Image (cartoon, rainbow, N blue to C red):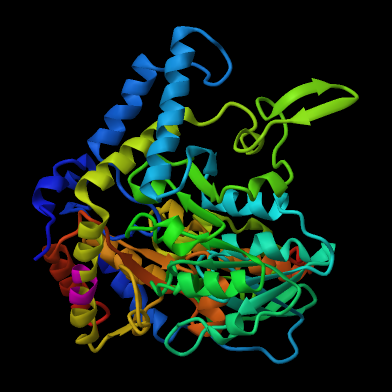
Amino acid sequence: MNGLDVGKLREDFPILKKKINGKELIYFDNAATTQKPTQVIDGIKYFYENLNANPLRSIHTLAEKSTKAYIDAKEKIAKFINADSPDEIIFTKNTTESINLVSFSLRFKPGDRVATTMMEHHSNILPWLRLKPYGINVDLVDTDENLELDYSYYERLPDDIKLVTLTHESNVSGTINDVEKVVKLTHEKGALVLIDGAQSVPHMKVDVKKIDCDFLAFSGHKMLGPMGIGVLYIKGGIAEKMNPFLTGGEMIKSVRLDNVIYADPPALFEAGTQNVEGAYGLGLAVDYLSKIGMDNIEAHEKELTEYALKKMSSLDNVEVYSGKSRNFGAIISFEVKGLHPHDVAYLLDREGIAVRSGFHCAQPFIEQKLKQHGTARASFYLYNTHEEIDRFIEALKTMNKKRS
Amino acid sequence: MDEMKFYELSEIYKNPPHFKKIENPTYSYEGFSPSCGDNFTVYLKVNDKKIEDASFFGYGCVVSTISLSKLCDYIIGKNIDILNEIDLAKIEALVGIDQINPSRIKCATLGIDSFKKAVTNKKEPKN
């Protein structure tokens, strides 16, 4: 057993008490988004009842409170990922916007090369393919039969490499990549590294100093926080060499029509009124996760995943695509033989079990590497239990067998 | 759609009528649903505006497959203009579902959309 009192912490999540189609909800779609504890839900209400004003601009008392809420959230997040300074934290809408920010703001020149991978979410492929018409070459690092990255690519990086970008954990297979090794090899070549942490930051201790990455992108809503708030960490010293992203309010020092002077980062990348409610809520989510302890969460999820994989592999009507890599997280892609993933998701939903089905925004990985038209996906979080997995297995066991 | 209905449809799903390719079709179109991965090519054999044969071939869920199968049943022998009269309600009636869940509407309409695009020869935007 691990150090998590799951029964007690489940009390913090009101939605988990809901009945879906007459059955107790089992929420296994955490890789898509997670549920929110009352600490976050009530906190957002508290923000609007006590702290709301436009931050960083007005000088009245409420505006100062709102500014403090915003800055405090950055400090919490900086500490959470072990960044040196809150100035290394840029608030965005989500991981997608964080990655796009880098693709728009990093100063590429024709002939530069970007390396992404075959196991990426579309949000870490399309921002780079978008650059191809500007003369940027894009490599897609391959994966092997165990859904591991081909690390030999990073050992022989091309000379024109400018940026290496990869996911920390696949949102399809759950493969956890050796990002430290990739960063080390890439830095030796003098290039930058972006880590897509959407599936890792919520589930394990992610330390930007230990990984030594230049960029880390992640989403608030996948880690108990609200939707519409995301983070881009930019290592100190790099942002100064980047162009602005969106232009407008609060990202400038001076605007004379013949001479615009932009603000320093992070303000440079945060044009317009920000999602302060979201930032505040994400700060509360980070408080919650820190109090539980990321190591405890990781251990709990590992135990659940191994339990589920063992049970699923014993079902003759189920094929599992996850769990083959050396290191993997709490994401299990699978199929029920003879059934389309949507139909699997539909039948599980009738039992109150929420899973994702389809391409999971990773069409190249699923079509070309898994050779599938889609998968069903169960993904766990700190509030899931062994009993829920037992009910899930029972539902799978009889699936597509009821009328045959 | 209740579970009973689903299992009734999933029986047809195992061997759906009109699941075949047509050689030298008058019209054909490869329809694709990017969120689900459903991928069907539809075929029409038309003579003097009359649909002599209709079929589909590919891969999809129970809802998209049965919708296509029932659709072929319905349009064969009719004037090609019938395609313009078919909407979601008609597909629900053909399949025998009261009301399709909002998340599955795209599955139900993939077939009719593909048939319409086959005739108008409308291509998906590509980069």
* A31 or A208, nearer to the observer: A208
Q: Position of residue B3 (x, y in %)?
A: 26, 65
Q: Which quadrant holds the C terminus of chain B?
A: bottom right
* Vertical arrangement, residue A115 with respect to residue A325, above or below: above
Residue placed furthest toward the top:
A60
Quarter placement of the N terminus of chain B? bottom left
In the image, residue A17 sits, relative to residue B49, either above or below, namely above
Front-lying residue, A135 or B118 = A135
Q: How many marks?
A: 0
Q: Position of residue A77 (x, y in %)?
A: 41, 42
Please state the extent of the stretch shown in magenta in the rendering. A303-307
- Predominant secondary structure, magenta span: helix
Residue B107 visible to an observer of this rendering? yes
Give how far across and how far down residue A312 sits, in percent: 23, 80
Is residue A25 covered in magenta? Answer: no
**In the image, what residue occupies the spot 18% across and 40% down?**
A12
For residue A352, say whether it is visible. Answer: no
Q: In this view, does A125 lie to the left or right of A181?
A: right
Residue plotted at (33% across, 24% down): A45
Q: Choose between B38 and A29: the one closer to the eye.
A: A29
* Residue B78 percent across, percent down from the top left: 65, 71
Q: Is residue B24 left or right of residue A142?
A: right
Q: Residue drawn 38% across and 58% down?
A: A206
